[in-house]
Image (cartoon, helix red, strand yellow):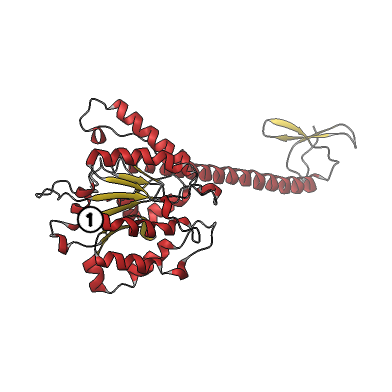
C-alpha cells in the first residue's frame, strides 16, 4: 500500500505512476481514477457534487410533501362537499322546522289557485324549459285535486315581447279576481310533500288574523334576496296595483337569451324601496325560505363557498326530505333534474306505501348530486 498522502488523508492502493487508485473509505475501497497529488481537487469536486445531490434530494422530498398536502386538501374538500349535501338533505331530521304545524288554531280554508306558465323555450340551451310542463303539470294537478284547489296553466297569456318569466305578472293578474289567494310557482318546481296544505303555509306565516288584517304578498328570499319564482298574493286592491306597478318596471327588462330576465330584479327594487309602513302592512317574508320555496342542493365548489359564507341562509332554504316543494332555480338541465325528483318521489312512495307518515320515516341522499 502507498503511504498516506499529505493532501488526501485516505489510504491509497496504486499500480504504477499512472495506474488506477483506490481510496479506503470506511471498510471499503472506492475507485478514484486520480493521479498522485490530485486528491484535494477530487474531494472538493466530490463535496460540490454531494451538495447538489443533497439539494436535489431535498427538493424532491419537499415536492412530494407539497403534493401529498394538496391531494389531502382536495380529498378533504370533496368529502366535505358531498358530506355536506347528505347532511343538508337531512336538515329536517336534525331539527330544522320550515312550517310550524303545532299551532293551537286550525288554518282557515281559502279558495286557492295554483298558477304557472311556460313557453317551453330552449332559447338558453343549458337552461331549457322545453318539455318541462308535461312533467310538472301531472304532479301539481294531483296535489290540487287532493286538497280541493285549482291548478291553472296560464301559458296562453304569454307576452312575446318580453322574456317569458315576466308573464307571471299577467297570469296572476288575470286569475286573481276569481280566488282569495293565488300561489304562483315557476315551471321548474315540483310538489315533494303533498300532505302540506296551502292554508297551513299561509297560516304559519301570517298567524291567526282576520282577512282584512292579512298581508297581501308572501315571498321568500335566498342568498341573493327576494325570489320571484314562488309567491302567494291575496285578492285585494293593493295586490292589483302592485302587479301593475311591477309590470311597468320596464327599465329592468333584459334582452332575450340571458339567464336573468329582469322581473326578479324589478321585484327586489319595489320591495327594497317600499315605504316601511306599507311593507309592514302588505308584505311578509318568512324567516324560513323552505316553507314553500326550497332550493335543491347541488354539490359544487361554488355552493360550498356559499354555505361557508351564508350558512344560515343556506340552512333555511336548502331542500330537505319532508319539504313542501323543491324549486330548481339556477340549475342547468332542468328536465333531467325534474325527472330525477319525480322518480325519487315514486320510489319513496313505493318503499313507504304502508307507512302513514313517509316523509318523516326515512331519508336518503338520492337527490344530492348527480
> In the drawing, does residue 115 fall left or right of residue 70?
left
- Height in image: 120 above or below 240? above
Q: Nearer the viewer, residue 38 or 132?
A: 132
Seen as rendered, the residue at the extreme left is 104
Residue at figure coordinates x 12%, y 60% from the top left: 210
Q: Nearer the viewer, residue 351 or 149?
A: 149
**Residue located beneath label 1 in the image:** 180
> In the drawing, does residue 348 fall left or right of residue 127?
left
Q: Residue 8: which quarter of the image? A: top right
Residue at figure coordinates x 45%, y 63% from the top left: 262
Residue at figure coordinates x 23%, y 25% from the top left: 354
Q: Quadrant of the N terminus?
A: top right
Residue 233 placement (x, y as % from top left): 28, 58
Q: Residue 181: which quarter of the image? A: bottom left
- Height in image: 352 above or below 180? above
Numbered circles on residues, count: 1
Give SS at disc 1: loop
Residue 92 placement (x, y as % from top left): 26, 43
Amino acid at each position: 500500500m502507498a503511504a498516506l498522502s499529505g493532501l488526501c488523508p485516505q489510504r491509497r492502493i496504486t499500480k504504477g505512476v499512472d495506474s488506477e487508485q483506490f481510496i479506503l473509505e470506511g471498510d471499503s475501497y472506492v475507485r478514484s481514477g486520480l493521479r498522485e497529488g490530485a486528491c484535494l481537487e477530487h474531494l472538493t469536486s466530490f463535496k460540490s457534487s454531494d451538495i447538489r445531490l443533497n439539494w436535489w434530494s431535498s427538493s424532491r422530498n419537499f415536492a412530494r410533501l407539497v403534493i401529498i398536502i394538496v391531494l389531502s386538501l382536495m380529498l378533504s374538500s370533496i368529502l366535505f362537499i358531498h358530506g355536506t349535501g347528505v347532511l343538508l338533505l337531512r336538515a329536517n331530521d336534525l331539527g330544522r322546522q320550515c312550517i310550524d304545524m303545532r299551532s293551537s288554531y286550525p288554518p282557515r280554508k281559502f279558495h286557492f289557485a295554483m298558477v304557472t306558465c311556460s313557453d317551453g323555450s330552449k332559447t338558453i340551451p343549458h337552461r331549457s324549459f322545453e318539455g318541462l310542463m308535461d312533467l310538472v303539470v301531472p304532479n301539481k294537478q294531483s296535489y290540487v285535486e287532493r286538497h280541493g284547489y285549482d291548478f291553472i296553466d296560464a301559458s296562453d297569456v304569454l307576452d312575446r315581447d318580453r322574456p317569458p318569466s315576466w308573464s307571471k305578472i299577467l297570469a296572476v293578474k288575470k286569475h286573481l279576481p276569481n280566488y282569495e289567494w293565488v300561489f304562483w310557482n315557476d315551471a321548474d318546481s315540483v310538489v315533494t310533500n303533498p300532505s302540506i296544505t296551502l292554508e297551513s303555509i299561509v297560516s304559519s306565516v301570517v298567524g291567526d288574523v282576520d282577512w282584512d288584517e292579512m298581508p297581501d304578498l308572501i315571498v321568500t328570499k335566498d342568498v341573493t334576496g327576494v325570489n320571484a319564482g314562488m309567491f302567494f298574493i291575496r285578492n285585494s286592491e293593493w295586490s292589483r296595483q302592485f302587479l301593475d306597478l311591477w309590470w311597468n318596471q320596464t327599465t329592468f327588462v333584459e334582452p332575450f337569451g340571458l339567464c336573468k330576465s329582469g322581473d326578479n330584479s324589478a321585484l327586489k327594487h319595489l320591495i327594497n324601496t317600499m315605504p316601511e309602513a306599507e311593507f309592514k302592512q302588505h308584505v311578509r317574508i318568512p324567516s324560513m325560505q323552505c316553507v314553500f320555496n326550497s332550493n335543491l342542493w347541488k354539490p359544487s365548489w361554488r355552493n360550498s363557498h356559499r354555505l361557508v359564507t351564508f350558512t344560515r341562509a343556506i340552512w333555511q332554504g336548502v331542500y330537505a326530505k319532508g319539504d313542501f316543494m323543491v324549486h330548481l332555480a339556477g340549475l342547468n338541465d332542468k328536465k333531467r333534474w325534474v325527472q330525477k325528483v319525480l322518480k325519487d318521489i315514486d320510489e319513496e312512495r313505493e318503499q313507504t306505501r304502508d307507512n302513514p307518515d313517509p316523509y318523516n320515516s326515512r331519508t336518503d341522499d338520492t337527490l344530492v348530486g348527480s
